Image (spheres, rainbow, N blue to C red):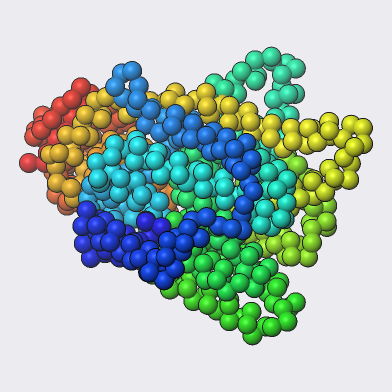
Amino acid sequence: MQSCGIIIPSLFFGFTVLSHIILLILSFLPLLFIIKKNGLNGIKNIVFSKSETNHKKVFIFLILPLTVLISVLLTNHILVPTESGGVASGQATYGDLNMHLGFITSIAEQGKFPPDYVFLSGYKLDYPFFVNMLSSSLYLFGCPLRWAVLIPSYVIAMLLVMGFYFVGYKITNKKSVAVLATLFFFLCGGFGFTYFLNGARQDSTIFTRIFTEFYKTPTNLNENNIRWANSICDMIIPQRTTMAGWCVFLPCLWFLVDALKNKSRKSYIITGILAGCLPMIHTHSFLALGIICATLFFAFLFKEENKKEYIINWVIFGTITAILAVPQLFLWTFQQTSQNSYPIRFHFNWVNQQDPYIWFYIKNWGIIALFALPAVIYANKDNKKLFVSALAVFAVAELVLFQPNEYDNNKLLFISYMIITILVSDWFIYIWNRLKGIKGSVYVAILIIFLGTFSGVLTIGREIYSGGMYETFSKDMIEMSEYIKENTPKNAVFLTSTTFINPVATLAGRNIYVGSSLYVYFHGLGDEYSRRSKEVENVYKGSYEDLVAFCTKNNIEYVYVGNYELNSYNLNVQILDKLEKIKNIGTETLYKIK
């Protein structure tokens, strides 16, 4: 919760060392209170829960291996050093990672809070950035950027796997179900592998190409309308906000289920605290949780005998959530929505391009969609209500677009998928117990696990192989970014190309006039991106006088020219001779407006 706790001191003192010292002092106060009231046993009871014991084998043989797998992928996908002195990424992180790095470095370098949007000068950062502040804190205190990203990611990865397992166990009270659901969720993939099996008849190299071609895997096969991603490769590794959002959402779901089952006010309170932190950790998870809570409130209200107590508990939960969440929503989320070039709008059928509706989800979700109906019929009354809440999230994701990129609604769909996966796994275990001992039942079980994981396993294999394959920043770019950090004002604005490989914003943490459409456009600022990108194209090929006038008007102090600028624009090289060249490193040159 450090990323939430640092907000208050940062509002007064900026994102600085002083703010972190204040947070550290404040963090000890609750511990001192607990120790004073209950002694050291109070701390022990918080750290070691009595309710979730006897899961050591699950931890050793399931949670730990999956955590290691995710950690391996993180390690060989994030700023991997190359022999030439540059850094590289894997397939999944080639695009999104640079955005998160820009947020991390700019928050730490500039120290301004609320932070600026590093990829569009003059705008406040409204994209959920709380998880990146964890890395910004490490970076601020001297941790190398690569490890500032990796260290929190390793911790979140383990919490995420553990969180999913224990939610599965909480919902069903069965270890076997929780284990199976965890496998299905993290190794998820539909029936996309069948296209490769069919293609192998004509081309024996088709499986080899899974590991070498860019996004040609059984979970990313657009030409065959396979759009359901693997949770590890496409959601956890590249999308830090999603990774952190799930890490908070899952405890919210655990405590919510506990509150409803045991009528525990304590669980309502804890759920409210966690939920209140979610908006700027991961807005989609916050929205999904809100839909689930609204659905479950009414679903459980009708059978509740003591309705007054029930409603009071929900009011307490809602009040705590609102106190923590509303300031975030007004300071960031609603402002992003209000300036969005693509407002919230109706849209049906997600990204399905060519298939019948039901068939699209069967081939993309695989056995989870195929057996969802018998699973919900088998489920107990409480879990039927949980299924309805998952269906409500699914319906919203299928009917409403909240951002320019329709594909991003999968962040809602995955929440629905989590719950349905647990319920389907519960039904599978029920069927297994009925068939156990019958000849051939083991082979049926192996087939089910194969069908539920084979596409995901192939995709994960591809990601492991792609680690460090794609160079993002050259040695020259890295050295230039270090020069910029040491020799330019922290609040300076730079004119660069709009490529997503941008050392000024990503590595040096300096604001640029306009960055990549992958970020600016898809964050809802499409009109502003279109205007500024055209201006940049014109000014690079214009006259020296036009360049100076443009930079003066927009408070731009520096002009950056590297390979991307030279190759992306019809650059008028004569204007560069009139600028003040302050640094040249290989192919990268930095100029100052005189």
In x, y percent, where is residue 363? 73, 39
Please identify the quarter of the rendering in which residue 29 is found.
Answer: bottom left
- Judge from the rendering whether residue 514 lies leftward or rightward of residue 555; answer left or right: right
Q: In this rendering, is residue 556 above or below 122?
A: above
Q: x, y (%) of residue 243? A: 50, 47
> Does 177 sit above or below residue 398?
above
Does residue 358 appear anywhere in the picture?
A: no
- Residue 4 falls in image quadrant: bottom left
Q: Residue at x 29, y 58 (%)?
A: 24
Q: Is residue 464 left or right of residue 372?
A: left
> Which one is nearer the viewer's eye here, 262 or 320?
262
Residue 198 percent coordinates (x, y):
75, 23
336 up-or-down from 196: above or below: below
Q: Is residue 471 left or right of residue 474?
A: right
Q: Residue furthest bottom?
A: 308
Residue extending farthest to the top is 204
**Which part of the image, by quadrant, shows the N terminus?**
bottom left
Which one is in front, 287 or 119?
A: 287
Q: Position of residue 466 (x, y in %)?
A: 49, 25
- Which residue is more in the foreground, 369 or 55? 55
Task: Using the rendered image of the protein, determine whether residue 467 is visible from the camera's viewpoint.
Answer: yes
> On the rendered image, what quadrant is the C terminus found in?
top left
User: What residue is at 57 percent from the left and 51 percent from the top?
Assistant: 163
Task: Please name whichever residue, 322 or 177, is drawn nearer the observer in this view of the structure.
Answer: 177
Name the residue: 73% across, 29% down.
194
